[in-house]
Amino acid sequence: MSKIFVDACFGKETPYTPVWMMRQAGRYLPEYMKVRAEAGNFLNLCHDPKKACEVTLQPVDIVGVDAAILFSDILVIPDEMGMDLEFIKGEGPKFNDPLENEADLDRLIGGEEAASKLTYVYDTIKLIKEQLADDKALIGFTGAPWTLATYMIEGQGTKTYNICKKMMYSNPELLHKILAKVTEVVKLYMEKQIEAGIDVVQIFDSWAAAIEPSKYDEFSWKYMVEIADYLKEKHPEVPIIMFPKGIPAFLDNVYGNFDVFGVDWSTPMALAKEKLGDKYVLQGNMEPCRLYSKEATTASVEDIQKTMGTSRHIFNLGHGILPDVPVENAKHFVSECQRVSKKS
Amino acid sequence: MSKIFVDACFGKETPYTPVWMMRQAGRYLPEYMKVRAEAGNFLNLCHDPKKACEVTLQPVDIVGVDAAILFSDILVIPDEMGMDLEFIKGEGPKFNDPLENEADLDRLIGGEEAASKLTYVYDTIKLIKEQLADDKALIGFTGAPWTLATYMIEGQGTKTYNICKKMMYSNPELLHKILAKVTEVVKLYMEKQIEAGIDVVQIFDSWAAAIEPSKYDEFSWKYMVEIADYLKEKHPEVPIIMFPKGIPAFLDNVYGNFDVFGVDWSTPMALAKEKLGDKYVLQGNMEPCRLYSKEATTASVEDIQKTMGTSRHIFNLGHGILPDVPVENAKHFVSECQRVSKKS
């Protein structure tokens, strides 16, 4: 059965513009909170294929999105490479052994050995595919090497990225070695996600905006493109979505063999369309805080539809949905996207 | 005596391109840390004209910048409007009584009454002007109404700005009332700073990037322009620098009666020059983390100079200097800016 979401990623005609939301399997859903409480903690939930499958499917059933996105966390990669990951309540993820030098990096396992340890992710994908309706797509994902490296080097989230950036400007060779080792694992990890059954790949560069525009290609984009090239050669039938958050000043320099460019909310859709609309299908980009108001949501959905028309576009938020959004407003967003783009 | 910094703000010819650094009176300087320790806490230091004057002058003497910037904090305004400000160690500023509704706003004092309470700032300016060399300029500053309002509404720093943005999309009238009341105080506060002796005004919109581009004028920029108009009418001899951080996608919409546009590091200077270089002198914009490496600093200073030439430009960082930067690297930045732009 043809999936409208996959067709849209390849720029084919679809009966309406499909929609999903970043972090759609998340804390705004009471049903998610219940499963998460049963799991005990966030990492347990990622490690439990049955529960991870359940929360992956919830937004498809409850909110009506056109694609499910695998429930997992970007940091399972460095975790399985041998770093000591903890999620501290109220503080977020923490590595107790951040990478400081080449010896730290050498201690981590890489390549096939690391990718093979992520069996709980592949098992989750297989379970989801058994239960997901045939006309809905399953999106698999990874963090971009740069975004993963920021956590591996800083040891935690950061406002200034000063440790990574000290390395970027004082010891770029070491940073490139870290990025290369992570890239190798990501390639194999995404290949195995595809073999397990995902229909679409999204690469999240959540911390893209931490790099000055003139250095973004060198330290992040080129590694994302390397991953896309690897996957496209093996699986051209699987569309790839790139989502670098917050880089409106880099749009002129975007290149590579992928299908969809994810537009964050700091980049106007009209600007993205002007710069990239001929080369890539565009995904996005409603400001997630508009979900606090149904009127503000409708106004934005109509604006975006007016800019994008009814082809070469996938509706989404411009960043993840926040935990305190009313579920009925999320439903309103999804149904408005489908309404305004419907071809009679 | 003519001040090279003021001349440069007005686009006049200068013997070299002047330079200063945001947060130049700050924690990277051991001399600052000593005075701050004597003051006991950050707010005491802002309230003590003698000590605030001392730390304002330090970077002029130690690092060799062409302008001093008043040592103070943007949050003294809401503090004197009657909000309960605390600086919690390791957490940053906190208001224990954030604004939730119109009654909360009505309880705050405004206008002349609030601006008159900031005497310690005006006293600090007078002291600085007695001691600052005649050829150096003193920059006074304020936070933009939007940036101030984020703290007044959230009660503290925030990653998501979800409380402010819920107000922006659900109750924009209340947000505009808050912004208007803050704008009135800012106008009078900056007028009094000018009367006390500052040579240049900078308006910092540190959280500009929290607003989607299509709403930025409505909720922030127009209030900044209103302040600039007010000051320009009374004191056309005082140049005004606008610094909205992180809005490369808004450059096409920048307007108003001010002199210098401060370019943050996420906006390439070439892009800013193309969009705004004819209308405004440009300030910026080295990535502050390049200060970790002298080589990376020199490379960036040379690039920026090549883009900007030797007129209609002021060197600066693209954001504040970080606390763990070696002082000698800050000196290197300043001397490199002066070297590359010197007219023989």
Image: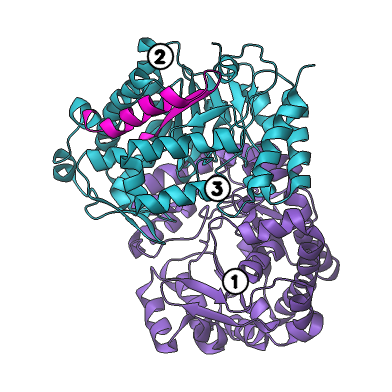
Chain colours: A purple, B cyan
Residue A236: percent from left, percent from top: 81, 65
Residue A48 vertical placement versus B19 (above, below): below
Which residues are drawn in magenta? B116-145
Q: What residue lies at 45% left-to-right and 16% top-to-bottom?
A: B238
Does residue A34 appear in the picture of this structure?
Answer: yes
Chain to which the residue tagged by mark 1 belongs: A
Any magenta on residue B121? Answer: yes
- Within 10 Å of disc 1 (Cα), the crowding (few <14, some 14-19, many 20+) is many
Evaluate if marks 2 and 3 touch, with contact meaning CB atoms under 8 Å apart: no
Residue A117 vertical placement versus A238 (above, below): below
Cα separation, mark 3 vs mark 1, equals: 26 Å
- Residue nearest the viewer, comparing A105 with B331: B331
Which residue is labeled 2 in the image?
B232
- Amino acid carrying mark 2 in the image: Lys
Q: What residue lies at 20% left-to-right and 25% top-to-bottom?
A: B112
Which residue is labeled 1 in the image?
A155
Q: Earlier in the sequence, mark 2 or mark 3?
A: 3
